[in-house]
Amino acid sequence: MAASPASVESVIRPLGSCLTKLGFEVYPLKVGWYNSVLPPSLHLPYPDDTLAVVVLSTPAMFERAFLPFLEQRGIQKPCDPVDQCVRDCVSTAVSQCFSELKVDVRYDYELLPSRKPKFLAQTAAHVSGAAFYYQQSDVTDQPWAGKKMFGVCIHPSFGGWFAIRALLVFEDVTVGSELVQPAPPDCVPSREDRIKLLEAFNFRWQDWSYRDVVPPAQTYSERQKEYFSTAPALRLALLRTWGLLPEEEVQPDLSPDEQSQANGHG
């Protein structure tokens, strides 16, 4: 099917109507914005004017989508329960809203055969204007003596209390000048605060403090904090204690290597 022009609103409105009530946010972007800041080996294989949408989960997603998903649908072992919920929400929205369009849906946890991620989530959020991706290069006169510091996205409303979940590429939809690239809100403008943010994220991510670098409009609930603070290998057992999974849906004990994977995304 040849690419055809479409209004951004004709995509964002129905997608948002399906996902916003479940605690997600959607932000449009052009593939060219994403590709322009990455090396060719990481490019999306679509023309620059192809429409894409990045999907974020807000703190509300846990109660609005995840817990009801467990109660109503259950899970399929051995996949991550949150990943299953996000996939169900997004795929349902795509099938309901865009049954006649070809949509390449890429989730944050998916890898290509090369072991590279299917998309760079923080880059997509930054170029769409959804959240500012603070990186080591954003700090002048760095105090880390050449040490590698990983970057982190900060949302203007939720600080670090959110997650980037998926990228939807509308393969046959092109957009023109109607879609202007927005600058992501610079919530952490000072050098000192950027240093504090990157150090909190790299050295003390377990204490949640980096998420509060800006006053958030909403944070994770106590139950949500407990879930994401629990090692991934132990989360199904936790859900069982909450009465959200029957006995037979709890995984058997995992290997020591699997149990060591304690830094689950949230």
Image (cartoon, rainbow, N blue to C red):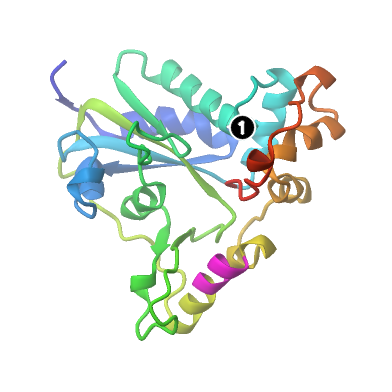
Q: Quadrant of residue 81?
A: top right
Which residues are the magenta region?
A: 198-204
Q: Find out whether residue 122 is within the magenta segment.
A: no
Q: Return the x and y of residue 93 as percentages of the image width and height.
A: 47, 23
Image quadrant in which the N terminus is located: top left
- State the residue position of label 1: 80
Q: Return the x and y of residue 69 as percentages of the image width and height.
A: 67, 25
Name which residue lies at 16% across and 24% down. Answer: 4
Q: Quadrant of residue 68?
A: top right
Name which residue lies at 62% across and 68% down. Answer: 204
Q: Find out whether residue 200 is within the magenta segment.
A: yes
Position of residue 121 in the picture relative to residue 69 (left or right): left
Question: Of helix, strand and loop, which mostly describes the magenta segment?
Answer: helix
Which amino acid lies under the numbered mark 1 shown in the image of this protein? Asp
Q: Is residue 193 visible?
A: yes
Q: Quadrant of residue 191?
A: bottom left
**Measured along the vertical axis of the image, is residue 204 above or below residue 131?**
below
Q: Secondary structure at mark 1?
A: loop
Q: Return the x and y of residue 126 as percentages of the image width and height.
A: 36, 55
Between residues 249 and 152, which one lies in front from this camera angle?
249
